[in-house]
């Protein structure tokens, strides 16, 4: 299998080549998954100045790790540098970074007092969007002093207080899995990732993005993702037939489906059905507000 160096964590790992993307598997940015990078962007990332690499690569590594750990698909191009720099998902303060660490243990523990082992702690500072291990250790010690976290070597446990703090930060409850079928257009997809998916998460759902490429194996994976979801959100702006099939599959399983479509495409939908009544939107901000109102009912 072909291998390549991940630019963000410096690990040399196997890659899968699919179309014009390379998918990096099980590197420190995504220890239990993978992320994609547009092949044409690899050299562009490599050619960035030392200052930008020093500032942004740890943040990009953390961004990849958090999203893939939450079940979201990450596909990067060089344009994403500035999008990630200004993304509201990126924590800035020590308090916000501490919350992200609590949320990580919350996702993996299942209950307060349950052990979570970090096998590569010295290389896990991307869990807190930190630039180095020193800041991660500071955050761990801070949470220990606040009696939110217990640590013995590489084994961690959330206390009752830590569990409740993580739960409150995630809306007071475990996030329910939600399958999201995004538009195919890359610009629209980035807008969903930056403006819409965080709102879905705030409403108590864990957005998991179905993979857009065709293929029997990937189609099976998407159907499994839908079957394990409590909600499906499907955008019809430039939808392929597979999106309608996925929505019908969810409907057959009695899983609620929220259909959306950009206003400019609302009159061009190829399928008319009583079951498909999409919410129309003109901007990602408007769509986020519509979904917030719909999911808060």
Image (spheres, grey):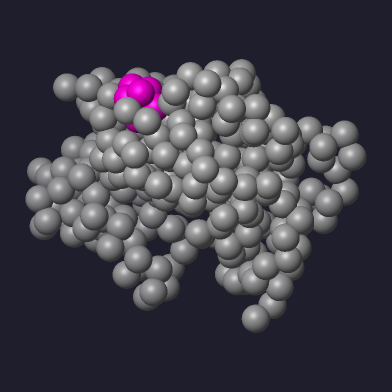
Measuring from the top left, give residue 276's x and y in whole percent: 18, 44
* Residue drawn 42% across the image and 39% down it: 157
Name above or below for residue 202 compared with residue 67: above
Viewer-proximal residue among 173 and 283: 173
* Residue drawn 32% across the image and 28% down it: 160
Quadrant position of residue 202: top left
Measuring from the top left, give residue 187's x and y in whole percent: 56, 40
Q: Residue furthest front?
A: 152
In this picture, residue 63 sits left or right of residue 249? right
- Residue 195 visible within the image: no
* Residue drawn 32% across the image and 70% down it: 220
Q: Is residue 279 magenta?
A: no
Q: Residue furthest bottom?
A: 1
Q: Which residues are magenta?
A: 161-168
Q: How many marks?
A: 0
- Residue 230 visible within the image: yes
Viewer-proximal residue among 145 and 139: 145
């Amino acid at each position: 299998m072909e291998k390549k160096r991940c630019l963000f964590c410096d690990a040399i790992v196997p890659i899968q080549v699919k179309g014009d993307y390379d998918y990096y598997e099980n590197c420190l940015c995504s220890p239990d998954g993978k992320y994609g990078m547009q092949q044409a962007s690899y050299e562009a990332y490599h050619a960035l100045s030392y200052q930008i690499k020093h500032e942004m690569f740890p943040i990009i590594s953390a961004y990849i790790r958090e999203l893939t750990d939450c079940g979201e698909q990450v596909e990067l191009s060089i344009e994403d540098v500035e999008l990630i720099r200004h993304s509201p998902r990126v924590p800035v303060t020590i308090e916000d970074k501490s919350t992200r660490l609590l949320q990580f243990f919350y996702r993996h523990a299942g209950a307060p007092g349950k052990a979570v082992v970090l096998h590569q702690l010295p290389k896990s500072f991307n869990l807190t969007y930190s630039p180095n291990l020193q800041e991660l250790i500071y955050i761990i010690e801070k949470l220990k002093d606040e009696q939110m976290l217990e640590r013995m070597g590489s084994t961690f446990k959330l206390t009752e207080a830590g569990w409740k703090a993580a739960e409150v930060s995630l809306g007071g409850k475990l996030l329910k899995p939600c399958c999201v079928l995004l538009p195919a257009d890359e610009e629209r997809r980035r807008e969903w990732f930056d403006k819409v998916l965080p709102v879905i998460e705030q409403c108590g759902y864990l957005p998991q993005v179905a993979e857009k490429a065709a293929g029997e194996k990937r189609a099976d994976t998407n159907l499994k993702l839908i079957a394990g979801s409590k909600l499906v959100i499907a955008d019809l702006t430039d939808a392929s037939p597979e999106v309608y099939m996925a929505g019908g599959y969810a409907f057959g399983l009695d899983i609620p489906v929220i259909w959306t479509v950009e206003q400019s495409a609302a009159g061009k939908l190829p399928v008319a059905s009583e079951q498909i009544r999409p919410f129309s939107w003109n901007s990602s901000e408007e769509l986020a507000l519509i979904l917030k109102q719909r999911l808060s009912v």
